[in-house]
Image (spheres, rainbow, N blue to C red):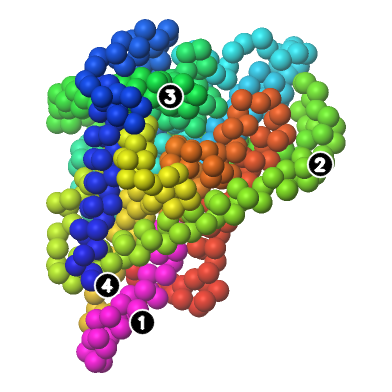
Amino acid sequence: MLRLAPALIIALLALPVGAGLMMVLLPAFGYLPTLGGHGASLAPWQMLFDQPGLGRSVMVSFASGLVSTAVALVIVVLFLAASRGTWLDRGIRRLVSPLLAIPHAAIAFGLAFLIAPSGLVARLISPSLTGWERPLDMLIINDPWGFSLMAGLVLKEVPFLLLMSLAALPQLAPEKRLMLARSLGYSPTIGWLKTVLPSLYPLIRLPVYAVIAYATSVVDMALILGPKLPPTLSVSILGWFNDPDISQRFMASAGAVLQLGVTVAALLCWWLLEQLIRSLTRYWLINGSRQRGEIILRLVGRSALLFSSITALAALVGLGLFSLAGFWRFPEVLPQMLTLDHWQRSGPMLATPLINTALIGLVSTALATALVLATLENEHRQHIQPKRALWLLYLPLLVPQIAFLFGLIVAAESLGIRPQLGLVIAGHLLFVLPYVYLSLAETYRRLDPRWLKVARSLGVSRSAAFWRVRLPLLLAPLLTAFAVGLAVSIGQYLPTQLLGAGRVTTVTTEAVALASGSNRRLIGVWALVQAGLPLIGFMLALGLPRLLGTHRRDLAT
């Protein structure tokens, strides 16, 4: 049975994406018999190109993917180069998983509460520093160029890229490389950039590409922070898909194919930038410069990631403050009173979305964890090299969700599968599985094999050794991977909205639906609940091993 697990994972990742892309290509060219499209046609593309503001939508989507990824990657690289072994390094490593667990929509709402004209930042500096007695008449949130969207994306992309980098670094023995550079007179930051980064980047290239794909096609954050007239391309596609006029589905399919093209173009542009930077920095790597730029690089490296982390945490504080605020006029820093009225009014409405969120998250993450464990154990027993099909793990992350989920719905309807809870769980599994694998695989492979050899020498079977030795030793990382998967599931907006046809409500879908309103108190309640659920999972992941007596510091995993 273990031998079937890798093939099952490949099928679960490749077949839905492939079927979704196929079934979105056909309607894009006019063929969808169920909606009256019986022949090939370019009419959907003509309708698409006639849409006002399409060029701006494409441009903002393209730019937001490249700019936010570049900024996030620079922040992570400079932090790793400048903060090795410091208290900041140790503190951020502890925070990276909880920060990654905060859903995109919660970060977006929190950032909006911070930087809005009447937000917390404006209140802190008014009127003493600015003289503002009224909120500034300026479009900061939903600005037409997507700067606020890019800022929100950076806050979410930094923890992910940092986690992927920290997972890859042990393969490179960075301490030995840096020690050699230091013995030749290189400063710590310059030495790290010249000796470690060139080998690290190829290991995190796929995660970087996944970030670009997500940022160019994000929906939930774009609904909250992105421009409105016109919106980003992915938001426009979602609107066309949900239009009561079903003929808009053909144009939505053409838009989904265009979104795929925008993402591919962004990835190609990034690849060209990689080649350009490689050529431009080749001389710098070998010119023998040992100290130049050390101070500024160290300052930026230590402050930029600290600033982004503090901003993310301040966003959560802002959510909590707004959810409890009573009367709060500008420019008062704090509300005149705190009240639980908003929580009490939201309580009855939270029940069904909370149950759905928990059910979908627990089932999809449990299935993903079981498949990953079976695959890794088969890899261990068969001595299989894992790198050959690693790119398949990123397939659902590299292909824009909007580009294949719509086709997946068409495929499901063709098979007579109606939107339902089971279909939503299957959709979440598609995105949860890669994160669980990436979170657990390295720790699983690095487990000291001598423990299993001792168990086998005592006459224990392979299966018994797995259950009685390997799993107890890996309980802490296993629970952490489960918490990561649960956080990913909780934050999924588009798969829930499309595969559930709006009938399966979760905390995330309800929170994003409130973005069109202006009740900050209610938004604060829902966004804080959404952010709190993954944090509960991580608290349990950290506390259960100690509670069960299996967290032994003297056992190396």
Relative to 73, does residue 15 appear above or below in the rendering? below
Q: CA distance from mark 2 to mark 4?
A: 54 Å
Q: CA distance from mark 1 to mark 3?
A: 56 Å
Binning the other alpha carbons within 10 Å of mark 4 as few (below 14), some (14 to 19) or many (20 upward) gives some
Q: Which residue is mark 1?
A: 468
Tell me the magenta residue range. 455-483
| Secondary structure at numbered mark 1 | helix
Q: Is residue 407 left or right of residue 240?
A: left
| Secondary structure at numbered mark 4 | loop
Q: CB of mark 2 within 8 Å of CB of mark 4?
A: no
Q: Residue furthest bottom?
A: 458
Q: CA distance from mark 2 to mark 3?
A: 41 Å
Q: Which residue is mark 3?
A: 246
Q: 552 or 90: nearer the eye?
A: 552
Residue in the image at 39% along x and 42% along y? 160
Q: CB of mark 2 within 8 Å of CB of mark 1?
A: no
Q: Which residue is mark 4?
A: 448
Amino acid identity at mark 1: Arg
Which quadrant holds the C terminus? bottom left
The image shows residue 190 at horizontal and vertical percentages of 28, 35
Which dot, 3 or 4, sits closer to the camera?
A: 3
Amino acid identity at mark 2: Asp
Q: CA distance from mark 2 to mark 1?
A: 50 Å
The image shows residue 99 at horizontal and vertical percentages of 50, 45
Q: CB of mark 1 within 8 Å of CB of mark 3?
A: no
Residue in the image at 28% along x and 52% along y? 12
